Amino acid sequence: MKPTTDPALTGKVALIIGAGRPLGRALALSLARAGAAIAAHDLAPNHLQETRRAVEHLGARCQTYTSDTGKGLSARSLLDDVLTDFEGLDILAHCLHISPPAGLLALDEWDWQRTLEINLSGPFLLLQAAAGVMRERGGGTIINILSTPPDDIPLAMSASQHGLSGLTKWAAAELLTYNINCYAVEAGSINVQAEMVPDVGGPHLSNSLEVLANLVVRLCTTDPERWIGKVIRLEEIT
């Protein structure tokens, strides 16, 4: 899939959840190249400034935010802050995950609850809040990134990703009437910890991240109706 160069998202605002991590930064860069302003969020400020500098290097506007999106008040406050700064929201991309490695017999209750908070409750709370804003604006795009195929990951992560898939399907059916398109994208074998590739002209993406990031831009700039509410597997379309 070729990189998107047409600034089709000029005037749009994209909120990236997990933007301080390589995958989130990849999405931020690709959406910025397509013309979007970027609201970059993560749980902690680590590496968020790297994302901001990379986005601003492309000439796009970027603001950074830190909050615990697994909690209702914090998630809603994040949306309020983004609306205060950008006066709108058109795209929500969620690619924030945690994954305790323990299996069924050894998994601590706190780790189980925290994984569901960040990986499933957070997307629900943000989707709910963002959908209200997008409905008033006449439409929008919501994309949830599934970290890896659920059968290949630890118990708590797997449960949360199955739940996230179901949440996305349900939301897609309910929100389509408001011109809000919801997608779930399975990262598959992509190494989401891959680093940005250094370049004298500014950072660019490794090949694996570029494929996923270009797909996200494609979902935001076209109307691929056949994918709405479905789990999109990269190997099926690239």
Image (spheres, rainbow, N blue to C red):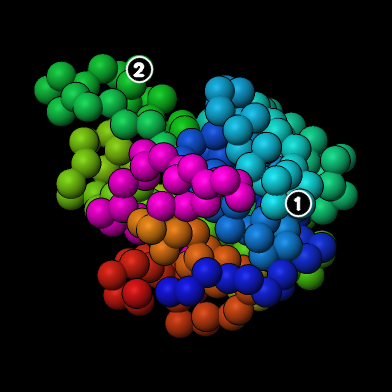
Report if residue 3 is visible in the image.
yes
Amino acid of disc 1: Ala
Indicate the secondary structure of the residue bearing disc 1: loop
Q: What residue is at 76 percent from the left and 52 percent from the top? A: 59
Among all residues in the image, which is located at the extreme left? 105
Which residue is tagged 1?
60
Left or right of residue 127: residue 148: left
- Residue 44 x/y as whole percent: 57, 22
Of discs 1 and 2, which sits in the foreground? 1
Mark 2 neighbour density, 10 Å: few (under 14) some (14–19) many (20 or more): few
Quarter of the C terminus within the rendering: bottom left
Which residue is tagged 2?
110
Q: What residue is at 15 percent from the left and 28 percent from the top? A: 103
Q: Nearer the viewer, residue 173 or 100?
A: 100
Q: Nearer the viewer, residue 215 or 195?
A: 195
Q: Which residues are magenta?
A: 182-206
**Marker count (numbered):** 2
Left or right of residue 189: residue 37: right
Majority secondary structure of the magenta segment?
Answer: loop
Q: Is residue 158 magenta?
A: no
Q: What residue is at 45 percent from the left and 59 percent from the top? A: 210
Q: What residue is at 33 percent from the left and 21 percent from the top? A: 111
Q: Nearer the viewer, residue 121 or 79?
A: 79
Q: Nearer the viewer, residue 211 or 171?
A: 211
Report if residue 219 is visible in the image.
no
Image quadrant of residue 159?
Answer: top left
Mark 1 neighbour density, 10 Å: few (under 14) some (14–19) many (20 or more): many
Mark closer to the chain start, 1 or 2: 1
Among all residues in the image, which is located at the extreme front? 200
Left or right of residue 23: residue 41: right
- Residue 211 x/y as whole percent: 41, 63
Amino acid of disc 2: Trp
